[in-house]
Image (cartoon, rainbow, N blue to C red):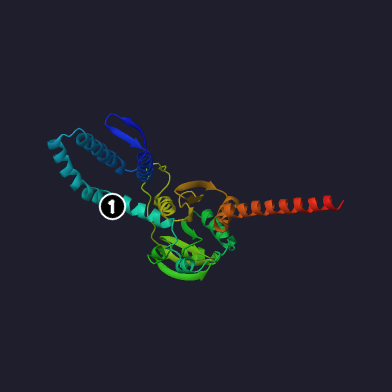
């Protein structure tokens, strides 16, 4: 093993540097996950105590090290109990970045196959419906998913599996409808379910003007790769939640653009356009070279 330098009795190698960097990244991600909640104070307290325990061990204080060691052994179990919501949220975030929740996982595992391109369906019924709902101060919560049917959340409500239409959305979110209390899940141009229960965000940075409907939209966007549209019951204004961020007071035109960009994955489309432009440039250069050679 190649050592870089030593600090007293400690010899530091490349492996130690990489180890420290990985642990730092892990701790930072855990802090970001719990930031804004009460759990972050408990986490910082446990982390401080553990660092003190490592110092005691390095100083070879046997009695104090033994007492703290027993406490740290029980502390793992206590941390699992205390941080149960955060651990669940962390596992959901990991699951969001994998393909295990997609129906085509086995096909992608066994067969080398190009993924189907995402196509945007007609969202005009949604835009027209939310404009009417906003005009009458009728609250609404609509979840758009492009990769998954969200079966876990769909099964928490009533399965509908009907084609998207303005009249159907109006009927669902009508204040006298038994389906209005909850979220609608939209996947590939169909309303998969209504009256769905969504996870509520625990962030403390959300303004007091936003109610439970906005918190549910924010919480859903934190743990899944979805876009959630909110119509405020108090003001009739439109909001979009995406990746744990809330965009407020949007116009119908802005709603249409954001939803279409999400459904078609605009970043990937731009990349394909850039690659196509490069290929065209190469072709033009090749043709120009041939013309010069012929001349």
Quadrant for the N terminus in the image:
top left
Residue 82 lies, with reference to residue 145, above or below; the image says above
- Quick one: which residue is furthest to the top in this view? 8
Between 229 and 264, the one nearer to me in the picture: 264
Residue 106 occupies quadrant? bottom left
Q: Quadrant of residue 196?
A: bottom left
Camera-nearest residue between 290 and 186: 290
Q: Position of residue 164 (x, y in %)?
A: 54, 66
> In the image, is 11 to the left or to the right of 180?
left
Residue at disc 1, secondary structure:
helix
Residue pointed to by mark 1 = 84
Q: Name the spot of residue 232 as percent of width and height, x first.
A: 47, 51
Outermost residue on the right side: it is: 295
Relative to 4, 123 lies left or right: right
Tell me where residue 123 appears, x and y as whole percent: 58, 61
- From the viewer's perspective, is residue 239 above or below residue 185? above
Q: Farthest front residue? A: 1
Residue 110 visible at all: yes
Q: Residue 237 at what x, y percent from top left?
A: 51, 49
Q: Residue at x 15, y 44 (%)?
A: 70
Who's the residue at 21% across and 46% down the image?
75
Q: Residue at x 58, y 53 (%)?
A: 266
* Viewer can see residue 35: no
- Kindly identify the residue that appears in the image at 46 percent across and 57 percent down: 141
Left or right placement of residue 154 versus residue 10 in this view: right
Q: Against 2, is 197 above or below?
A: below
């Amino acid at each position: 093993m190649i050592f870089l330098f030593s600090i007293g009795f400690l010899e530091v190698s490349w492996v130690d540097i990489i180890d420290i960097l990985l642990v730092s990244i892990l701790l930072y991600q855990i802090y970001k996950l719990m930031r804004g909640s009460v759990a972050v104070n408990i986490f910082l307290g446990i982390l401080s105590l553990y660092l003190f325990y490592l110092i005691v061990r390095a100083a070879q204080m046997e009695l104090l090290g033994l007492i703290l060691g027993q406490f740290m052994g029980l502390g793992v179990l206590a941390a699992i109990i205390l941080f149960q919501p955060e651990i669940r949220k962390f596992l959901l975030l990991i699951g969001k970045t994998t393909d295990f929740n997609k129906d085509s996982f086995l096909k992608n595992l066994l067969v080398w196959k190009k993924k189907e391109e995402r196509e945007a369906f007609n969202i005009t019924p949604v835009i027209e419906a939310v404009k009417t709902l906003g005009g009458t101060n009728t609250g609404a919560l609509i979840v758009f998913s492009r990769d998954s049917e969200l079966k876990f959340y769909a099964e928490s409500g009533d399965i509908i599996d009907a084609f998207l239409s303005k009249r159907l959305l109006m009927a669902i979110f009508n204040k006298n409808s038994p389906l209005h209390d909850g979220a609608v899940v939209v996947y590939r141009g169909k309303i998969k379910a209504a009256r769905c229960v969504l996870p509520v965000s625990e962030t403390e940075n959300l303004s007091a003007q936003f109610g439970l409907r906005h918190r549910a939209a924010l919480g859903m966007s934190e743990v899944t790769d979805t876009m959630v549209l909110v119509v405020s019951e108090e003001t009739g204004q439109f909001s979009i939640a995406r990746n744990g961020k809330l965009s407020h007071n949007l116009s119908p035109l802005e709603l249409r653009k954001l939803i279409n960009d999400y459904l078609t994955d605009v970043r990937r489309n731009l990349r394909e356009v850039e690659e196509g432009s490069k290929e065209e440039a190469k072709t033009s250069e090749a043709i120009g070279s041939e013309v010069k050679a012929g001349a």
